Amino acid sequence: MKKLTIIFLSICMVFQMGYASGNKEEKQAPVQDTIKMSMASDIDSFDPFLSVAYDTQAVNKNIFEGLMTFDENGNCIPSLSESYEVSEDGLMYTFHLRHGVTFHDGTPFTSKDVVYSINRYAGLDGNPAILDTFAQVKAVQAIDDYTVAITMKAAHFGFIYNMIQPIVKAGYDQNAELPIGTGPYKFVSYTAGQKVVLVRNDSYWGTKANIKNVEIYFINDAAATISAMQSGQIDFGMVLPDLFAPLAKNYDLIASPMNMTDVLALNNDETPFDNVKVRQAIYYAIDRQEIMDGAFGSKAVPIYSPVSSTMSGYVNTNLSHTYPLDREKARTLLREAGYPNGFAMTITVPANYVQHVDTAQILVSQLAQVGIDVTINSVEWGTWLEKVYSNRNYQSTIIGMTSLIDPVDILQRYTTQSKKNFYNYSNTAFDAAIDEALASQNNESVVKSLQKAQQIVNDDAGAVWLCDPEMTAAVNKKLGGYKFYYAGYFNFSAMYYK
Amino acid sequence: MSVYFKNKSFVLGLIFISLVFSLSFVGLFYLPYDPNQIDIAAKLQGVSRSHLLGCDNLGRDILSRLMVGSRISISLGFLSVALSFLIGTPLGAIAGYKGGKSDEVLMKFIDTLMSFPGILLALMLVAVLGPSFTSMLIALTLMGLPRFARVVRGGFLSNRNKTYVLSSKARGASTSRIIWNHILPHISIDILNTASITFATSVMSEAGLSYLGLGIQPPNPSFGQMLSGAQSYILIAPHYIVSPALLLILLVLGFNLIGDGLREIQQ
Amino acid sequence: MLYLSRKLLSTLITIILAAVVTFLVFQILPGDPALVILGPNADPAQIANLHQSMNLDGSAVSRFLTWVSAAAKGDFGTSYRYGTSVTGLINNAFGVTLSLGLLGLLLSVIIGIPFGVLLAKQKSKGKGMVLSFFSQLGLSAPNFLVGILLISLFTVQIPLFPSMGYIPFSSSISAWFASIFLPALSLAVGSSAVIVRYLSTSIIEQNEMDYVRTIRATGEKESLILYKHVLRNSLIPVITIFGMLLSEVLGGSIIIENVFSLPGIGKLLTSSITSRDLPLLQALVLYLSIIVIVCNFLVDVVYQLLDPRIRLE
């Protein structure tokens, strides 16, 4: 019987030698016509009308394009529309579409595709609206094959950012199975839970991609991702900064803030957080640097308002000196608020986000130093969404909110009426400042209003804004051109082999 | 008494188990550090004179955390295994000995239980009872129960028609006497094996469940918590995972060795 | 014939029971599937739309009955999370899990049985500490530790295998084998240790029984005693535990699939629970109960083959 074991194992060896000999090259250098990327989570849907996941959209942006797009600095720049004008009163946008663009199946791109897509987003074609952000659209009209006019119900400064949304081929509803867009890469195949394969679009209207093939593999386990890179099966992907060391020989670690704001939310409706002094006390008791070092491997940028410092035009930089670490001040404020001996509180964290759980654990020890006794309540994700986010049934919690390029979006979540205001923050002056920003016609006044709003919510310590964690990517040294963007976008066409 | 101590397996097993038990026992009175004391500067530090087993990813002393965590894991593990045994064994015994209708009905219950993914069970318990030692205990007991039931049933099925049982029956022995004094001793080794393996499995299940937020709440340490926390760092800070894994291995080994020794002594 | 139809009826009852309990559990569970799938950063309109497509109107009872009548025809609906047919998802995942499971268990039998016999032999001579130690190591070492170690060794240090992904049997046999060999080996490390443990202790137990002494006294050769008499009886608990291993493995090895990025049933199951994907979960529980029932049935059959004295009636 032992002989059987030996025979069987020998057969195994023979089998995989056939495999190995064909793949000896793999470890030496990346195959030059393919990018192999790893992604931690699976695609949710290729259909732009159905997809919400950050990572999916980051991939989809290679297949689909919108009238506008954004560059690495967060500026809105032309894509499928070469130029546009806005009427004086801000109620009409006219887009001049690019000529000579075709979809991946050869169909020419014209205004009817734009009308179809925007009608779907805004719910103007009888179907329910797909995005509430299109709610102010009154009508869309094709003036001719290459001109589209969008009429608004009310002026909204940030509306142009919505034009980043993908334009879909008119009447085509199979995008979930076979996505057809206008972008620099075409869809080849998708195996659920395993990989996505893309190929270069050789009839692309813009600068053609350098590398022909893209393969994206879903690897959930952090250590397995590192191993896959070590063995040369993956050329680049997001990794935890703490784990990068074994890759240092053949990979570079590139980091950039991702316009996500990690926040300790204090339920403004719950005692003791309905008292502004208590919220401010907590602010003074927190050591952001320790949190960034401990939970994010020092790869994070501190933030002092809901707006990340990456939104350089809009963030209120005067706020960075507010609430420095000052335990004495914290204790004084607590005394003034009627808690001379501190108090007990609970932080509810979603267990699947390790960085939030770690942040909570660090906060336990930090807040203990001012007499606040913290208990951690780690819950499953679905439970967090229902309890904390929907029902606002929590005392405090830690979560990361992703922002869009539209600067008003993340601040709007703090307005009294917002459905997303699980912070329960309410201040009429803040609401007024946001309304001002929405009604503004020029960038200058928007910036002024938004900065005012940030000052107000910071004074109130509406929440404790911790940091903007950096996206850290390990990129094979032979691969160049990887750029970070402030919204989800893996720009494969800009990458090249050195 | 000395017979026990002459047996190699028994002694070795005892040593292993004592090592782990004394670790948690000492932990009741003395801990080198506060197990929840965070020290970011010491993040993932390896074995050193100040930290005998190194530090975890938040700079906490692994030894102190193990001393506290082993208490939680051992009690959780032992209790759930004990409960699974206490409930599963009689079920298996009746099903295996009586056969026929009782076997069908009891096994239907076991089959239904086995069809449920542990995660779903734990999720539901946590939703109803909140995350706690109790909900974990119930979940792990339910997950381990079928093993005992099936193994015991198998043992009884194979033994009930054997000569020694039939002759006991012929001599007028009562059912309970046959079950307790005759058959059960013969399958005791299978039960012991099941117990030790189920113990190891329950720690791993606890690790998997804490990954989802269904287990012991942080920052309280437990073998499972530490194993799942250390998972990502295997390649760069192996000391983090080696310690809890080693303790778990010692426990299981020790338990099995004692079992072996007892049996060797018995004949 | 009667036995078979009774068995079938009994199976149906178990399955329906499992389905009912799953459905009930789901109603109690907190978490809105649409919100879980789309996340808190989603646009409220998208969440509303997803709700629509989930057909959550009607009482729990009527929804359950709708599901049952569709399921009876083989239509298990569309997954909330993936938006594609549930049967399609399970089919694909099943191929992966089946490959992993069968190869893994095959390896564990090939390794486990010979070593189990060997260990029993050594122990009877008072040796066997080393083998015993290693087998118990395999038993108590965490799955993912073994997996990552194997990956480190056989994909990084010695690039023999891929460390992730699955290539179906139909595209290339050698690539298929390479993609599941390491995961199957990880599985086998744990399972073979279990087999070794049960088998060796069982053999030792049997060797001491009266009937063996009697046969030995007749002067029969030791190895013949082993193979003709002892092994048969010792295999009973091994078969029981093997049956459980089989149903566990076919139910998806969550940890190994995670470490090796294999899109199997384990991943599908975890995702269906955390995403509150009821159609997928219901179908998976159905699949699991069928697996459990079939495995346990096979175990009973093998019992009777091994020892005709075991009569299940």
Image (cartoon, rainbow, N blue to C red):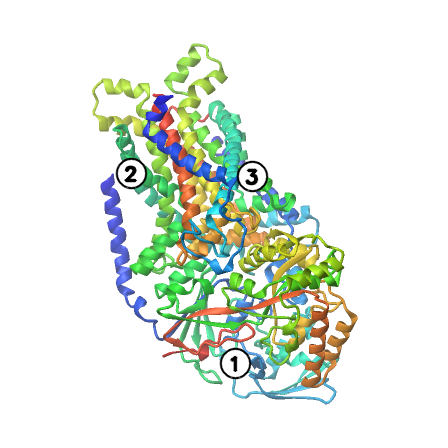
Q: Residue at x 63, y 64 (%)?
A: A263
Report the residue that reaches farthest toward the right.
Answer: A428
Q: Which residue is mark 3?
A: B137
Residue A268 versus residue B80: which sits nearer the camera?
Answer: A268
Three-letter code for the amino acid on which mark 1 is drawn: Thr
Mark 1 belongs to chain: A
Query: Is there CB contact under 8 Å for labels 2 and 1?
Result: no
Residue B260's disc is none
Q: Are marks 2 and 3 on the same chain?
A: no
Q: Nearer the viewer, mark 2 or mark 3?
A: 2
- The span from disc 2 to disc 3 (Cα, nearest Å) is 34 Å
Report the residue that reaches farthest toward the top.
Answer: B171
Residue A125 versus residue C221: which sits nearer the camera?
Answer: C221
Which SS class for mark 3? helix
Mark 2 belongs to chain: C
Q: Residue at x 40, y 49 (%)?
A: B242
Q: Residues within 10 Å of mark 2 (few under 14, many from 20)?
A: few
Q: Residues within 10 Å of mark 1 (few under 14, many from 20)?
A: few
- The span from disc 3 to disc 1 (Cα, nearest Å) is 61 Å
Left or right for B55, reference A93: left
Q: Which residue is mark 2?
A: C130
Mark 3 belongs to chain: B
Three-letter code for the amino acid on which mark 2 is drawn: Val
Residue C76 appears in the picture as rendered = no
Q: Nearer the viewer, mark 3 or mark 1?
A: 3
Give coordinates of residue C146: x percent, y percent.
Answer: 38, 50
Give coordinates of residue C219: x percent, y percent.
Answer: 20, 20
- The span from disc 2 to disc 1 (Cα, nearest Å) is 71 Å
Residue A41 appears in the picture as rendered = yes
Residue A107's disc is 1
Which SS class for mark 2? helix
Three-letter code for the amino acid on which mark 3 is drawn: Leu
